[in-house]
Image (tube, rainbow, N blue to C red):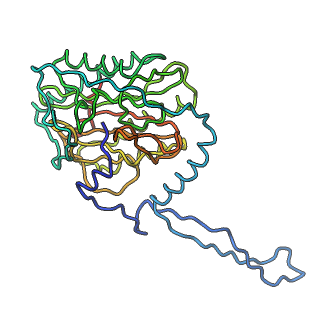
Amino acid sequence: MAVVDSLVRSASPRASPSSSPSSKSSLFAGSPLAFLPARVSVKQTCPNRRLVIVSKRISGLEEAMRIRRERELQSTKKFKRRPPLRRGRVSPPLPVPDHIPKPPYFGSPLLPELASEYQIHDSDGIAHMRAACELAARVLDYAGKLVKPSVTTDEIDKAVHQMIIEAGAYPSPLGYGGFPKSVCTSVNECMCHGIPDSRQLQDGDIINIDVTVYLNGYHGDTSKTFLCGNVSDALKNLVKVTEECMERGIAVCKDGASFKKIGKRISEHAEKYGYGVVERFVGHGVGTIFHSQPIIYHHRNEEPGTMVEGQTFTIEPILSLGSIECRTWPDNWTTLTADGGPAAQFEHTILITRTGAEILTQC
C-alpha cells in the first residue's frame, strides 16, 4: 500500500534534488547551427564557412521533464479510452474475530504518521517477515484468480478478507486511517487506493489488487495488476512494462546500494516505452510497522541514503499511459489519473542481503 509523497515530505523533510551543472547525469543540448559565410573567391570550389555551435547544459532531471512532456502529448493520441470509472455502493466493513491480534492503529480513524525508524531485522524478525509476506503472496494469487467480467470488487474484498482471517492474520488496510475495506482494488485509471464496491468488472478492464496482511506482529505488503477478459494490446503492454520496471528496481538493491538507483533504473525503462512514472506515491519501509522510512522514490531523484543488510521495504512503481498528475475522490482515498488515462502498478516487499535482495512476497 503506497504512501503519499506530499505527506511524507511534510512529516519528514528531505534534501531537494540537485540540479548542479557538475551533476554526472548532465547532458548537452545544441541549438540550431548558425552559419556565417565569409567572402568567396571565384576560384574557390567550396565556400569557407565558420561553424558556431551554442550549447546549453541541462540536468538529468530537466531532461526527464522534457521527455515527460513529449510523452504526454504523444501517448494520449494513441489510446482509445474506456468509459470513466464510476463509484458503486460501498458495503460496511467486515468483522475480524476477537482472537486475531490487531495492529496498533486498529479502532482509530486517524492516519498514522510515517515512522522515522528503519526496519532492520534479526534472524527471528526475518522469519516472521517471510511468513507474513508468503501469506500475502498466496492471498494475492487467490484474489487474481477471481478477476473476470461481472465480478464486483466487493466480492473480491470479501474473499480476501475471509482467507486472511482464516490464516489467523489481520487485513492491514482495514481501518488504516479510516480505510473501510480489507484490500485495495484499483481499476483502469485508478492509480491506487481504490475502495472495493458494487461495480462489476468489465471485459477489457485492468485491476490492481493490493494485499497487506498483519501476521504475528509483522506486515507483508504486495500488489499486482491483473487483466480482465480481452484486454487491448496497449493495456497489456503497460502492465507488462510496469512489472518489468519493478523487477529492474529490485535488481539494483543490495547492502550499501543507493536508494536513488531504484528510481533511475525504473525511469530509464519506462521512458523507452513512453510511459510516465507517477511521483506522488512512493514505496516505504515495512515490518512491525506498516509504513516507515526509508521512502522509496520510483522516479529520477537525488535523495540521499543507502540500503542496509536485514532491511525490509517495498518497491511499488505506478506507470501511466498519459498524465502522471492525479485527482482524488471525496472519499479521500481513491486516486485517479488527472486525464483519465490508464495506470498500472506492481509491488513486492524485499529483504536486503549482502549481495542482493530477496523477494519476500512470492509463493
Left or right of 295: which side holds 154?
Answer: right
User: Which residue is rendered at x = 51% and y = 46% of the image?
Assistant: 323
Query: Measured along the vertical axis of the image, is residue 337 above or below residue 167?
Result: below
Q: In which quadrant is the C terminus drawn?
A: top left
Q: Nearer the viewer, residue 147 or 99?
A: 99
Q: Whole-percent x and y of residue 216? A: 12, 26
The total of numbered circles placed on residues is: 0
292 displayed left or right of 302: left
- In depth, the one of 171 and 25 nearer the eye is 171
Q: Is residue 63 left or right of residue 254?
A: right
Q: Position of residue 246 (x, y in %)?
A: 38, 37
Residue 1 pos. (x, y %): 30, 36
5 in relation to 319, above or below: below
Determine the image quadrant of residue 107: top left
Question: What residue lies at 39% left-to-right and 22% top-to-bottom?
Answer: 153
Q: Residue at image x 23%, y 39%?
A: 177
| The furthest residue to the right | 42
The answer to which quarter of the image holds residue 207 is top left
Q: 289 or 241: nearer the eye?
A: 289
